[in-house]
Image: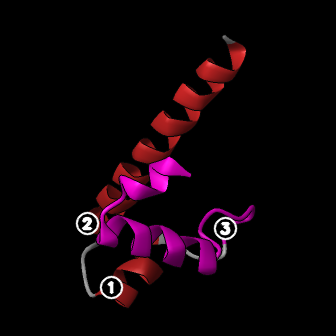
Amino acid sequence: IEGCQDLSDTERETLEAAVSNGYFETPRDGDLGTLAEEFGVSKPAVSKNLRRGQRKMIQRVVTALNDIEN
């Protein structure tokens, strides 16, 4: 949960929209184009925001898992 504090507003909003639009579902309902239109930015910009947000969250999860194992 602390990883959420590291997210910028843009990263948080992008991740929330990706979840809402089914971007992480299998099969995927939403795509980068849908998210780009929603935010009025390019697909690469959305991708960058998603990756940055995911990286921050995953780094915190990995750290927490390592702490649990020790």
Residue 45: image tag: 2
Marks 3 and 1 in Cβ contact (< 8 Å):
no
Image quarter in which the C terminus is found: top right
> Of helix, strand and loop, which one carries label 3?
loop
Which mark lies nearer to you, 3 or 2?
2
> Of helix, strand and loop, which one carries label 2?
helix
Q: Does the magenta stretch include residue 25?
A: yes
Q: What residue type is labelled 3?
A: Arg
Disc 3 or 2, which lies upstream in sequence? 3
Q: What residue type is labelled 1?
A: Phe
Q: Residues within 10 Å of mark 1 (few under 14, many from 20)?
A: some
Left or right of 68, for residue 11: left
Marks 1 and 2 in Cβ contact (< 8 Å):
yes
> Of helix, strand and loop, which one carries label 1?
helix
Left or right of 7, for residue 21: right
Q: Nearer the viewer, residue 9 or 1?
A: 1
Q: Does the magenta stretch include residue 7?
A: yes
Residue 39: image tag: 1
Marks 3 and 2 in Cβ contact (< 8 Å):
no
In percent of width and height, residue 25 lies at 71, 65
Q: What residue type is labelled 2?
A: Ala
Rendering quarter of residue 39: bottom left
In percent of width and height, residue 19 lies at 60, 71
Q: Which residue is drawn at 39% across and 51% down?
A: 51
Disc 1 or 2, which lies upstream in sequence? 1
Q: Give the residues drawn in magenta, as a range.
A: 1-28
